[in-house]
């Protein structure tokens, strides 16, 4: 089949007689390719970061937490029954949480201790699946599960005993210290109040998110209550709740408001991590608009190329108009050039972008070795590797936007070429 008149001329202008492809055309395609490749990689990484963050949060944290506004939940058994009676609540479990001091081998850290019910917790979170080989999910007696980052910092291994200090009786300790300043005999009483707890490490968990692995210690519920002086009153910090759908927790929260007694409030995982997700969404949108300027620059490159072609082909344009070529035929000649450049830029950019996403972590390791530094530190980004998730809708928007930008860039010089006066154009000879 013969190509249409306008498309035939457009391809002839893009492909000179002496070379397969003109250097100017190659540069134009390369500009579009780089813009699309960078956009696809960036948006996919930001989307993957968000989805990975959601996955790690939902694997370690409950969908909803129920707490008393005073910080201590009394008569929690009744509240637990009320929570379990709410529709779409899959499971609920009590917990105790607060900062502690962990000591091992003359090294100390200040992690957050979470006391959990070992029988109910696997129904709430995926913590049992995070235990590294060599350990087990055993929270019977005086046992503890340690985050992998804490274990690395303190050089802790399975079977070691660590000492935990908790400020459960902090007010009493402060009063005793003031008394000891007046009476040296009271110093012994202060020492009795500071009651450390020796716990055996039965497992080291690796959630995949550095923030969790460097922050949390998991202990049995009764140990957490004892460390925080809650065992006698049998009170807890709150109740962890798992719902049927983590992304429809707002409806369950509304039902909980009606079922919970006064003073008891609930908070969803989305509300607790709102700052993270808002920041990721804003960065993702800003990245798209900023990096899209690469495509805009490529569009200006196409426009400059077509303006040069119009100046060089002024006589030929005059001859075509004199032979009866219509305005839209002339417009389509140069419009097709921009569309062809946009099409091949889309194809090559999409191919390179998907390849780079597929081998992103290998490229990161190679670049880190080449530069001699860590490219994606887990301590900052909270992930061991670069996450990525390709959304077909996002890729379609990027490619379509780039194609439209290239076409619009070609439309402006094409319009001026079509408006050339044939008589003046032929005088250029």
Image (cartoon, grey):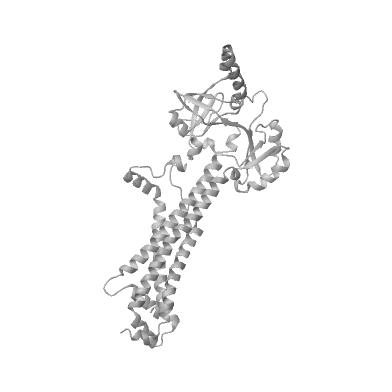
Residue extending farthest front: 182
Residue extending farthest left: 18
Q: Position of residue 6 (x, y in %)?
A: 40, 79
Residue at the image point whose x is 43% and y is 68% from the top: 406
Residue at the image point whose x is 45% and y is 39% from the top: 379
> Can residue 416 be seen from the camera position used here?
yes
> Can residue 114 be seen from the camera position used here?
no
Q: How many marks?
A: 0
Residue 390 falls left or right of residue 186: left
Front one among 267 and 246: 267
Residue 91 falls left or right of residue 149: right
Residue at the image point whose x is 54% and y is 45% from the top: 276
Residue at the image point whose x is 44% and y is 57% from the top: 39
Q: Position of residue 133 (x, y in %)?
A: 45, 33
Q: Vertical placement of 164 versus 13: above or below?
A: above
Q: Vertical placement of 204 versus 312: above or below?
A: above
Front one among 62 and 338: 338
Q: Position of residue 275 (x, y in %)?
A: 56, 45
Q: Position of residue 357 (x, y in %)?
A: 42, 52
Residue 3 falls left or right of residue 59: left
Give the quadrant of the N terminus: bottom left
Give the quadrant of the C terminus: bottom left
Front one among 119 and 201: 201
Q: Quarter-wise, where is residue 271 in the image?
A: top right
Q: Quarter-wise, where is residue 273 in the image?
A: top right
């Amino acid at each position: 089949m013969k190509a249409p008149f306008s498309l035939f001329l457009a391809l002839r202008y893009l492909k000179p007689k002496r070379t397969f492809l003109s250097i100017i055309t190659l540069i134009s395609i390369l500009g579009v390719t780089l813009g699309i490749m960078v956009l696809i990689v960036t948006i996919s990484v930001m989307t993957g970061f968000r989805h990975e963050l959601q996955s790690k949060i939902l694997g370690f944290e409950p969908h909803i937490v129920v707490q008393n506004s005073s910080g201590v939940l009394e008569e929690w058994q009744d509240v637990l029954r009320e929570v379990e009676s709410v529709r779409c609540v899959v499971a609920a479990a009590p917990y105790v949480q607060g900062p502690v001091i962990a000591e091992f081998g003359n090294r100390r850290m200040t992690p957050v201790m979470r006391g959990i019910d070992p029988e109910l917790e696997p129904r709430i979170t995926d913590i049992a699946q995070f235990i590294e080989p060599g350990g087990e999910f055993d929270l019977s007696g005086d046992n503890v599960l340690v985050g992998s980052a804490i274990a690395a910092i303190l050089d802790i291994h399975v079977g070691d005993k660590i000492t935990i200090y908790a400020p459960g009786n902090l007010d009493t300790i402060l009063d005793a210290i003031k008394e000891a300043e007046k009476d040296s005999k009271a110093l012994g009483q202060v020492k009795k109040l500071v009651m450390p707890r020796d716990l055996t490490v039965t497992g080291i968990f690796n959630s995949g998110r550095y923030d969790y692995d460097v922050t949390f210690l998991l202990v049995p519920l009764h140990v957490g209550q004892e460390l925080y002086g809650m065992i006698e009153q049998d009170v807890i910090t709150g109740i962890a709740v798992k719902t049927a759908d983590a992304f429809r927790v707002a409806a369950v929260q509304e039902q909980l408001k009606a079922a919970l007694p006064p003073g008891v409030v609930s908070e969803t995982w989305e509300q607790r991590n709102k700052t993270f997700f808002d920041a990721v969404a804003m960065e993702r949108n800003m990245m798209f608009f900023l990096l899209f300027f690469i495509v805009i620059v490529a569009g200006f490159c196409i426009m400059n190329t077509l303006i040069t072609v119009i100046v060089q082909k002024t006589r030929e344009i005059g001859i075509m108009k004199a032979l009866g070529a219509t305005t839209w035929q002339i417009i389509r000649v140069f419009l097709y050039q921009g569309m062809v450049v946009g099409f091949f830029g889309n194809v090559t950019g999409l191919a390179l972008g998907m390849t780079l996403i597929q081998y992103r972590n290998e490229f990161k390791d190679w670049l880190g070795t080449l530069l001699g530094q860590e490219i994606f530190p887990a301590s900052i980004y909270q992930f061991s590797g670069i996450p990525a998730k390709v959304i077909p809708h996002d890729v379609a928007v990027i490619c379509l936007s780039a194609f439209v930008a290239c076409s619009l860039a070609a439309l402006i010089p094409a319009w001026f070429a079509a408006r050339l006066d044939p008589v003046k154009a032929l005088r250029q000879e």
